[in-house]
Amino acid sequence: MQLWAKIVYDYACAYNFSKQKEKKSILGSMTPLYYIRAASFVKEAEYFDDEIADAVMEGNAGVFERMKGYLIKRWDYYKEK
């Protein structure tokens, strides 16, 4: 999940600091990755009950929260470019 958080954060920075004409391309390249991640979660959660699925999603959200420092560093890097 840490790798996924880094990917999402890197895409968010690239999108935010890109020129308008590049934004569509950035989103387009992210879409297949999102679909793969979503399909992976669906397969993983196929036999989860609601309580377990919620716990997994909360855990995933926690990873994004813990990776906030990575986002800040990347954001600052893009801002300085």
Image (cartoon, helix red, strand yellow):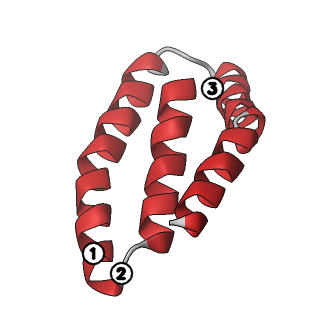
Residue marked by disc 1: 22
Query: From the viewer's perspective, is residue 13 above or below residue 74?
Result: below
Amino acid on which the number 2 mark rests in the picture: Lys
- For the N terminus, the image quarter is top right
Whether residue 70 sits left or right of residue 22 in the image: it is: right
The answer to whether residue 24 is visible is yes
Q: What SS does tag 1 mark?
A: helix
Q: CA distance from mark 2 to mark 1?
A: 5 Å
Query: From the viewer's perspective, is residue 73 above or below residue 50?
Result: below
Q: Residue 42: image x %, image y %?
A: 41, 29
In contact (CB < 8 Å): disc 2 and disc 1:
yes
Residue visible at 65% across and 24% down? 56
Amino acid on which the number 1 mark rests in the picture: Glu
Q: Earlier in the sequence, mark 2 or mark 3?
A: 2
Residue marked by disc 3: 53
Q: What SS does tag 2 mark?
A: loop
Residue marked by disc 2: 19
